Image (tube, rainbow, N blue to C red):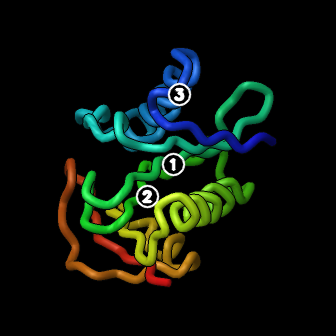
């Protein structure tokens, strides 16, 4: 299993294609939620993924302060295979990267409500009331160091 981290401008067309394919597969097809998945923030993000045999197993993106939240942000967390620990691994690696690259003392996420316990296991805590984003219940969560 390879961990790959690249800023948007470093991505090859094939890598970008695989990332967008994985994100659409989970967020649009699996969750039956058609919405504008390409939000413009990818251009300013580090993209991190676990890859095995040319296939993305888990992915997330990391944004510096000010591009999405006042705090460093981690988002678009996905796994393409459930129950194998890929989600926990990529989230832990993303947190480590945010701390090293951006000296993050806080990380904010916009989490789908169903994933609240997943993020709580990593140390995040809920900081907002539930809200709807693209018809899916979400909450803001914060991890402080």
| Residue 91 - label | none
**Upstream in sequence: badge 2 or badge 3:** 3
Picture quadrant of residue 52: top right
Q: Is residue 111 above or below residue 11?
A: below
Give the image location of residue 141, x and y in percent: 35, 74
Give the image location of residue 67, x and y in percent: 27, 52
**Upstream in sequence: badge 1 or badge 2:** 1
Horizontal side, residue 113 vs residue 86: left or right: left
User: Which residue is painted at 21% across and 48% down in the image?
Assistant: 134
- List the residue tagged with mark 3: 10
- List the residue tagged with mark 2: 74
- Residue 91 visible in rendering: no
Element at badge 1?
Answer: strand
Q: Nearer the viewer, mark 1 or mark 3?
A: 3
User: Which residue is painted at 54% across and 67% down in the image?
Assistant: 99
Please tell me how crowded label 3 is: few (under 14), some (14-19), or many (20+) other residues with Cα within 10 Å: few
User: Which residue is painted at 43% across and 58% down in the image?
Assistant: 74
Please tell me how crowded label 2 is: few (under 14), some (14-19), or many (20+) other residues with Cα within 10 Å: many
| Residue 60 - label | 1
Element at badge 2?
Answer: strand
Of residues 128 and 103, the one drawn nearer to the viewer in this rendering: 103
Give the image location of residue 87, x and y in percent: 62, 57
């Amino acid at each position: 299993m390879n961990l790959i981290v690249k800023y948007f401008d470093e991505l090859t067309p094939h890598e970008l294609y695989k990332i967008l394919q994985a994100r659409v597969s989970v967020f649009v097809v699996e969750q039956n939620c058609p919405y504008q998945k390409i939000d413009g923030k990818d251009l300013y993000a580090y993209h991190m993924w676990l890859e095995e045999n040319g296939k993305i197993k888990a992915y997330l993106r990391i944004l510096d302060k000010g591009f999405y939240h006042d705090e460093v942000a981690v988002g678009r967390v996905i796994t393409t295979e459930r129950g194998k620990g890929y989600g926990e691994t990529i989230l832990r690696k993303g947190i480590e990267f945010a701390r090293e690259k951006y000296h993050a003392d806080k990380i904010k996420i916009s989490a789908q409500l169903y994933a609240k316990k997943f993020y709580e296991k990593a140390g995040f805590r809920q900081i907002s009331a539930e809200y709807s984003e693209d018809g899916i219940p979400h909450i803001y969560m914060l991890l402080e160091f």
